Image (cartoon, rainbow, N blue to C red):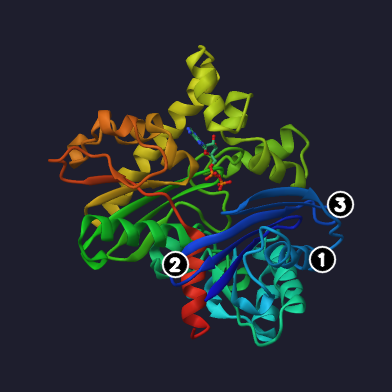
């Protein structure tokens, strides 16, 4: 049985077709420049193809992607009827959805009512779901898997912001947290790798990519996370500032004559490693510049490592201890220097990294702590698509 997993943005559609018996990815790709022309990058075991296409809308992109899956030499299905269900990544499910769910018109209306909470993401997710429903037969179940759902177990004391409570009631302003599928996947997987039940472990999951968040997963439940109402809060990221003194916002609006859009752009697109270094949002380039003596690139790296160390310490305090720290995401899976910096100095907490092992780990499942380390440290490549596919299978009753 095959499940199609969709991660849609306002002008792009990432997809994977997964064979559920083996959980193998049999095709994956990207439709981009939707509404601006169109380009498709499509990969299967038989090879990869990249060509220009014409997608004025998401619906046409879906039609093209079904064609790519089912026609020509690299076809992996003979017709779209082989796709048993479709799973969609939805960024914001707020406190309305604490688990993945079957999509129907009621759900889409509810999601539309949440657009103010995720204006950059949810409208695109909804548009893509509607387009997909137009392309597939009504018999094909469509399931939404929310980035926020895993964090719905966070207690009130960690999700309420200290602003007038009525504003929480009126606007639902609270911590939601994101990257839920990734935190769920790596915490579950690391428990399997260690050979202990997840409900006996206190895990700190560090998802470090272009967007980064850390989660405290106490016996399988998220009890705190660094991202908040939006994916802007928490540690410094590629172009996002993360947590800063809130009064910087009004200060900058006044001193730099910025309006709401201007200050939002500054915090989301011009800050983080890019803002500190003045060079790049890409960690590989930062490492390279720092190695050549660029002081601001080095500072960006120091800030990232220091913030990670602080959050690991504070989440261990929040859980009353920690058994496992797990690194994932492009940076967490590949940068041994950041992993080392995040753990160096935490020996007092029982975290002892094996520097020799750590140096050689790129995107594979490996324990990187010393054999006697009280707290285990692991690298586990994330697999959000597999979480979406598994949930879709279960919810669709397949
Ligand atoms: P996204 O959040 O967009 O999914 P990724 O998880 O792919 O992003 O992470 C992208 C980040 O990972 C970039 O900053 C990139 O420089 C970094 N990265 C990827 N490979 C390496 C590597 N080998 N060493 C250091 N950083 C890496």
| Front residue of 398 and 112 | 398
The answer to whether residue 299 is above or below residue 229 is above
Residue 338 horizontal/vertical position (percent): 40, 32
Residue farthest top in this picture = 293
The answer to whether residue 277 is above or below residue 158 is above
Q: At numbered mark 1, what does the secondary structure look like: helix, strand or loop?
A: helix
The residue where tag 3 is placed is 37
Quarter of the figure with residue 241? top right
Label 1 near ligand 1 (CB < 8 Å): no
How far is the residue under mark 1 from the one under mark 2? 32 Å
Is residue 279 visible in the rendered image? The answer is: yes
Q: Nearer the viewer, mark 1 or mark 2?
A: 1
The residue where tag 2 is placed is 150
Dot 3 or dot 1, earlier in sequence: 3
Residue 161 horizontal/vertical position (percent): 49, 59
Q: At numbered mark 3, what does the secondary structure look like: helix, strand or loop?
A: loop
| Front residue of 45 and 333 | 45
Side of 329 where 353 appears, left or right: left
- Which residue is pictured at 43% across the width and 37% down the height? 334
Residue farthest left in this picture = 372
Quarter of the figure with residue 253? top right
Residue 330 horizontal/vertical position (percent): 49, 42
The residue where tag 1 is placed is 60
Dot 3 or dot 2, earlier in sequence: 3
| Front residue of 86 and 148 | 86
- Which residue is pictured at 66% across the width and 37% down the height? 251
Side of 226 where 210 appears, left or right: right
Side of 313 where 120 appears, left or right: right
């Amino acid at each position: 049985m095959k499940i199609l997993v969709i991660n849609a943005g306002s002008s792009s559609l990432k997809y994977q077709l997964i064979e559920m018996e083996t959980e193998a990815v049999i095709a994956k790709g990207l439709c981009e420049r939707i509404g601006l022309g169109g380009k498709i990058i499509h990969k299967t075991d038989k090879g990869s193809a990249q060509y220009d296409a014409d997608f004025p809308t998401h619906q046409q992109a879906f039609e093209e992607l079904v064609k790519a899956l089912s026609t020509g030499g690299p076809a992996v299905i003979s017709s779209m009827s082989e796709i048993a269900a479709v799973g969609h990544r939805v960024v914001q499910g707020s406190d309305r959805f604490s688990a993945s769910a079957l999509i129907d018109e009621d759900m889409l209306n509810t999601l539309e009512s949440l657009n103010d909470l995720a204006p950059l993401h949810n409208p695109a997710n909804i548009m893509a779901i509607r387009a997909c429903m137009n392309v597939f037969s009504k018999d094909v179940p469509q399931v939404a898997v929310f980035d926020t759902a895993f964090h719905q177990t966070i207690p009130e004391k960690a999700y309420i912001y200290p602003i007038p409570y009525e504003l929480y009631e009126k606007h639902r302003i609270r911590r939601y947290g994101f990257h839920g599928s990734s935190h769920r996947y790596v915490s579950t997987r690391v428990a399997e790798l260690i050979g202990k039940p997840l409900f006996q472990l206190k895990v700190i999951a560090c998802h470090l990519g272009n967007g980064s968040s850390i989660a405290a997963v106490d016996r399988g439940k998220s009890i705190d996370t660094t991202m908040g109402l939006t994916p802007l809060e928490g540690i410094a990221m590629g172009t996002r500032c993360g947590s800063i003194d809130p009064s910087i916002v009004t200060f900058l609006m006044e001193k730099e004559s910025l309006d709401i859009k201007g200050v939002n752009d500054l915090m989301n697109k011009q800050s983080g490693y890019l803002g500190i270094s003045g060079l790049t949002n890409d960690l590989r380039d930062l490492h390279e510049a720092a190695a050549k003596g660029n002081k601001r690139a080095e500072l960006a790296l120091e800030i990232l490592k220091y913030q990670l160390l602080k959050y690991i310490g504070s989440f261990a305090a929040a859980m009353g201890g920690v058994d496992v720290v797990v690194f994932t995401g492009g940076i967490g899976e590949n940068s041994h220097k950041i992993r080392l910096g995040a753990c160096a100095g935490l020996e007092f907490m029982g975290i002892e990294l094996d520097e020799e092992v750590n140096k050689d780990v790129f995107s594979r499942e490996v324990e990187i702590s010393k054999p006697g380390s009280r707290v285990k440290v692991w690298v586990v490549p994330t697999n959000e698509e597999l979480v979406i596919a598994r949930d879709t299978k279960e919810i669709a009753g397949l």
